[in-house]
Image (spheres, rainbow, N blue to C red):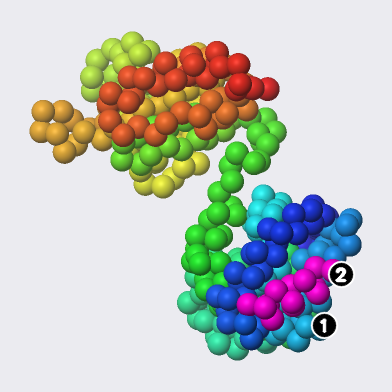
């Protein structure tokens, strides 16, 4: 349930946390001067116990109550300190909100934020709130384990989001993105059958866990084959898979329909006998001598989706065709490298 979590690792690197808070105070113009800020930080850190997994909240309490720092900058200082020393764990807690959309805490947080920040509530009712702004308010409420029915606590959370760009020198959208798009930190989903890495000069590098195609997916592939062959004549499996991969890339991947793209590629990968695969796709529609999308398949040398993801992380993005020619060599080198553990 949102509003409760196991905390973050106990604070070990106090120097890094102190430096982050000092920088944040300077950006927010909190505290009289640098010596005063250092004094506030030192006094607050003195109250953090060695095994405290909720030391962000401890810092907030000490900074706000004992040193007289206002609550909003106190929260932002604690957040920046935690981000400096436990970024992955903070991002994990924030990311957990994204999979808890039916949690009653969210409804209470919306009501609390609307009461605490009428301007935000008005924009929310009028559907004029950026989704990242809304998400981050709920996520920070959860991160700091705040009571969504407490108007003052929700007022502080709203203020945190408003001032976060200045405190962290990043946009709300980029901060949320940095928390959510941590694909490599998540375990492979249960039931993952394969892994597809898409390389493109126009869109960069993207990876997808693939689920084993079911009867409906195989039947759809058969129907697509019949439709294509009615136009082109008989196609061997190699020609068919390239035609269909190019179509899925154009119709789904480039249109942002990644779920349809991944599920559509599953029976193609099965037909190829490759559960883990690199798909290079290049749009050549601007070239008058060529037409549509060209595709190249490169086996990843494994059937283990987790291993394939690790290989994909090591591969370079494709900037030119001569880079593509080295992809197979990169894969071989990754498999052979003693320092690269695939398990």
Eyeballing the image, is 7 above or below 300? below
The overriding secondary structure of the stretch rendered in magenta is helix
C-alpha separation, residue under disc 2 versus residue under disc 1: 10 Å
Mark 2 or mark 1, earlier in chain: 2
Classed neighbour count for the residue bearing mark 2: other residues with Cα under 10 Å, few (<14), some (14–19), many (≥20)? some
The image quadrant of residue 220 is top left
The image quadrant of residue 167 is bottom right
The disc label shown at residue 47, or none: 2
Count all numbered tags in the image, as a single digit.
2
Residue 155 is left or right of residue 316, and the answer is: right
The disc label shown at residue 66, or none: 1
Taking the spot 40% from the left edge, 21% from the top edge, the residue there is 327
Quarter placement of the C terminus: top right
- Residue 99 x %, y %: 67, 54
Taking the spot 55% from the left edge, 49% from the top edge, the residue there is 181
Stretch of the chain drawn in magenta:
34-46
| Mark 2 and mark 1 residues within 8 Å of each other at the beta carbon | yes
Name the residue furthest left: 288
The disc label shown at residue 14, or none: none
Taking the spot 77% from the left edge, 71% from the top edge, the residue there is 42
Eyeballing the image, is 3 above or below 288? below
Q: Is residue 176 visible?
A: yes
User: Does 250 appear in magenta?
Assistant: no
User: Does 36 appear in magenta?
Assistant: yes
- Residue 289 x %, y %: 11, 28
């Amino acid at each position: 349930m949102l509003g409760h979590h196991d905390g973050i690792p106990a604070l070990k690197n106090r120097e890094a946390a102190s430096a982050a808070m000092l920088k944040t105070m300077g950006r927010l113009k909190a505290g009289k001067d640098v010596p005063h800020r250092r004094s506030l930080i030192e006094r607050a850190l003195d109250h953090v116990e060695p095994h405290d997994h909720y030391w962000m909240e401890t810092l907030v309490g000490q900074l706000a109550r004992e040193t007289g720092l206002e609550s909003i900058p106190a929260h932002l200082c604690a957040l920046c300190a935690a981000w400096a020393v436990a970024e992955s764990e903070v991002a994990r807690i924030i990311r957990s909100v994204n999979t808890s959309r039916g949690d009653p805490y969210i409804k209470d947080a919306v009501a609390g934020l609307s009461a605490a920040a009428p301007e935000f509530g008005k924009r929310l009712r009028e559907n004029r709130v950026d989704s990242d702004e809304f998400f981050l308010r709920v996520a920070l409420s959860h991160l700091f384990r705040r009571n969504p029915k407490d108007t003052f606590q929700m007022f502080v959370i709203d203020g945190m989001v408003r001032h976060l760009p200045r405190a962290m020198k990043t946009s709300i959208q980029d901060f949320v993105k940095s928390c959510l798009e941590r694909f490599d930190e998540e375990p492979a989903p249960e039931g993952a059958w394969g892994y597809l890495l898409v390389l493109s000069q126009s869109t960069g590098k993207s990876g997808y866990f693939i689920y084993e195609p079911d009867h409906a997916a195989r039947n759809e592939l058969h129907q697509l084959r019949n439709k294509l062959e009615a136009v082109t004549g008989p196609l061997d499996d190699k020609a068919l898979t390239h035609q269909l991969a190019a179509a899925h890339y154009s119709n789904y991947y480039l249109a942002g329909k990644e779920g349809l793209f991944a599920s559509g590629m599953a029976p193609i990968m099965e037909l190829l006998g490759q559960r883990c695969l690199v798909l290079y796709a290049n749009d050549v529609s601007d070239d008058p001598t060529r037409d549509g999308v060209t595709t190249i398949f490169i086996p990843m040398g494994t059937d283990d989706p987790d291993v394939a993801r690790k290989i994909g992380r090591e591969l370079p993005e494709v900037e030119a065709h001569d880079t593509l020619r080295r992809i197979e060599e990169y894969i071989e080198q990754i498999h052979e490298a003693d320092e690269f553990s695939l398990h």
